[in-house]
Image (cartoon, helix red, strand yellow):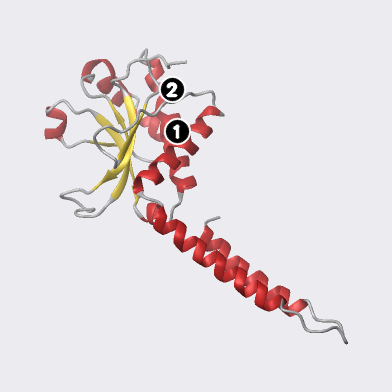
Amino acid sequence: MTEREFLIQFSHFKQEFLDTSKRPAGKPKGNRKKVLENFERWLQLRAKMEKAEMTFSDFLNNVVLVAGKILENNNIAISCPSPVFKESKRCISIFNNSTVFYRIGRVRPRRGFNKGQNILVIELVMDGHKKSVFLPLLEMKEEIEERLGEKLLRELPRTEAAGHYRVKTFLPYHLVESNDVQIVARDLADFILATLPSLEKLGLSRHP
């Protein structure tokens, strides 16, 4: 449940409470309604402040942290090197081969349906591993998509021709705007869980 959904539900519960909890005859009036209204306003203010205070960098850090906990429950250890050049992305390392890794971040396509709009991207980066990882992985694309429940996307042909080999999925940016860390973290973990078995079949070993 998001904080907005909680606020709506709380408002309904508050009214139900006021309607059903009648003051016994002869009992002095209290400030129960005022306290509840003040509490509701405080929750609304808190939600606005949290949304304003969380930067995109903070959002990514929280997503990786939560996804890491999900993966840890599946006996998968991850590491996330500190970003050295882009605060808009986070790399996630699982394999002993550090040049094959996962990445989550923000992009703004220059063409296509999402042209000029911020979107979230979760991707598996295999640059420089066309024959050993990328092409064999594409042969297992259908089984990965079946595990994931959606289609995997590739880079444009000219991007792949330059040696950049990735498969990816996109998420709507409103998940960032509403601070839905749990949803994005779950999608990130699902992407890793769907692709990892195929990568291990290709001989990539996980670090301890």
How many numbered marks appear? 2
Q: Residues within 10 Å of mark 2 (few under 14, many from 20)?
A: few
Q: Is residue 167 left or right of residue 23?
A: left
Secondary structure under tag 2 reads helix
Image position, residue 164 (x, y; %): 19, 28
Res 52 quadrant in image: bottom left
Asked if residue 152 can be seen in this view, the reply is: no
Which quarter of the image is occupied by the N terminus? Answer: bottom right
Image position, residue 165 (x, y; %): 22, 28
**Residue at 57% of width from left, 61% of height from top?**
6
Residue 147 is labelled as 1
Image position, residue 80 (x, y; %): 39, 29
The CA distance from mark 1 to mark 2 is 10 Å
Disc with the residue nearer the chain's start (1 vs 2): 1
Residues at badges 1 and 2 in contact (C-beta under 8 Å)? Answer: yes
Res 141 quadrant in image: top left
Residue 35 is labelled as none
**Residue at 24% of width from left, 55% of height from top?**
117
Which of the two residues, 29 or 2, is positioned nearer the viewer here? 29
Asked if residue 177 can be seen in this view, the reply is: yes
**Callout in the foreground (1, 2):** 2
Residue 197 is labelled as 2
**Residue at 43% of width from left, 57% of height from top?**
51
Res 92 quadrant in image: top left
Q: Amino acid at mark 2?
A: Pro
Q: Amino acid at mark 1?
A: Arg
**Residue at 31% of width from left, 22% of height from top?**
100
Secondary structure under tag 1 reads helix
> In the image, is residue 128 above or below residue 84?
above
Image position, residue 204 (x, y; %): 37, 15
Which of the two residues, 62 or 201, is positioned nearer the viewer here? 62
